[in-house]
Image (cartoon, rainbow, N blue to C red):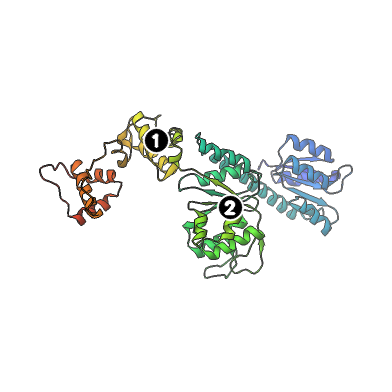
Amino acid sequence: MTGERILIVDDDESMCEFLTIMLEKEGYEVHAVNRGREAIDLAKTNRYHAAMIDIKMPGMDGMTLLGELRTISPGTPVVIMTAFSSEETAIEAVNRGAFYYLVKQAKKDEIRLVIKKALEVGRLQAENRFLKQQLRSRHSSKKIIGKSECFEEVFHLVDRVANCESTILICGESGTGKELVARELHYRSRRADGPFVSINCGALPETLLESELFGHRRGAFTGAVRDKDGLFTVAKGGTFFLDEVAETSPAIQVKLLRVLQEREIIPLGGTKPVKVEMRLIAATNVDLEQRVDEGLFRADLFYRLNVIQIPLPPLRKRRDDVPLLVDFFLQETVKRAHTGPKSVTPEVMDLLVRYDWPGNVRELENVVERAVVLQDGDTIGKEALPPKFQTMGEKPVECNLSGTANVTLEQLERRYLAKVLEEVGWRKKVAADILGIDASTLYRKINRYELAPDRKSEKQPV
């Protein structure tokens, strides 16, 4: 027994009986009524996986009932039945949301097949709704966290523009949460039930990016064995997030301009334009106006993208948010790692707040995850942080610059490198952190200036 429930509505008692017997033999649970009002009452209290309704009935006709059922149970596929086929009526029924149009003289096998397909469509739609709910719940767990004044302005702007249809340009350094803001805009808009589609323009070569964005027709290039919809088409009814838009080539910029101006695309190898219906949100981690001045980005495209701009401040500009973010990432990481609760020492929190975070929130999340994994106890100490944090707070190496007016910059650099190395006992990794350079760069400078430790003061070089 399938357990799937089917609603039959027909003023002809014999037709109701015929369909009930046939479908119950297939294992379905069948509810049959003769009036539209009875069907509405049942639909309000029962979940039906499919419905079959007669188009001509006294009182409420099938078309009116179709509209009512679409409102009460939008996920239920409806098959319209009629004694006399009419192309115009069939088209109208489908346009109003009917799954199929079936004449009553149809053979049993055809009826069984139509019901089977209707139930399959209903299952797919239910799965689709479930997956969207999962995406929403997953998004809700990735909160936009911040209480600093500059970030409150971001929240205010998101509130103002979430439900409009204008193109949005999100600006900010890598790791500031541009995609998170884009998803927030999507799920708070009237397009929340549509797809959220994203692509990183800097992650793909030009030819592949063009195919992904606009799609292609069969034979457009070697390997194009079938037609493929582009992501602009896939995003129909939803939001398309175009990340790293500054990395697009001039040729793709021209096509993007057409999308924004005409709301249409031409797939690779195609000749006819295809209409697209979505909201565009773009993001960049560079100054697009400067790119325009340098001739690297089209001015007309920039002005089309820059309708409403949301600038995201880097983490170093909102240090008050670091403790909030640390607590949030601690809870999330502990949950994933299935460990006990963990906290950070005041010393560690002070280091995290004072650090400049060139990788922004993404870097902070990675540092917290690393600390949770490496720390055995329930309190995270300085030793669980990356090496660059170990020398933070140490007294800076002083270098007397008196009498250097006639010294070249190269000679001054050599003198300072030697001073730092001597002060830390030639521990090269420590010296590199103090100097703010990579260890490999320090090694090259040591070789270039032919520096060597003074054996009297040499400790334990690393």
Instruction: Give the residue type at disc 1.
Output: Val
Q: Which residue is mark 2?
A: 306
The numbered mark, 2 or 1, whose residue comes first in the sequence reads: 2
Q: Quadrant of the C terminus?
A: top left
Q: Position of residue 207 (x, y in %)?
A: 51, 65
Q: Quadrant of the N terminus?
A: top right
Residue 353 - label: 1
Which element type, helix, strand or loop, lies under badge 1? helix
Which element type, helix, strand or loop, lies under badge 2? loop
- Relative placement, left or right, of 441 versus 180 is left
Residue 143 in sight from this viewpoint: no
Q: Position of residue 107 (x, y in %)?
A: 77, 55
- Relative placement, left or right, of 336 versus 118 is left
Residue at point 57%, 48% (across, down): 309
255 is higher (above) or lower (below) than 455: below
State the residue lying farthest toward the left.
Answer: 456
Instruction: Give the residue type at disc 2.
Output: Asn
Q: Nearer the viewer, residue 208 or 53?
A: 208
Residue at point 82%, 59% (across, down): 87
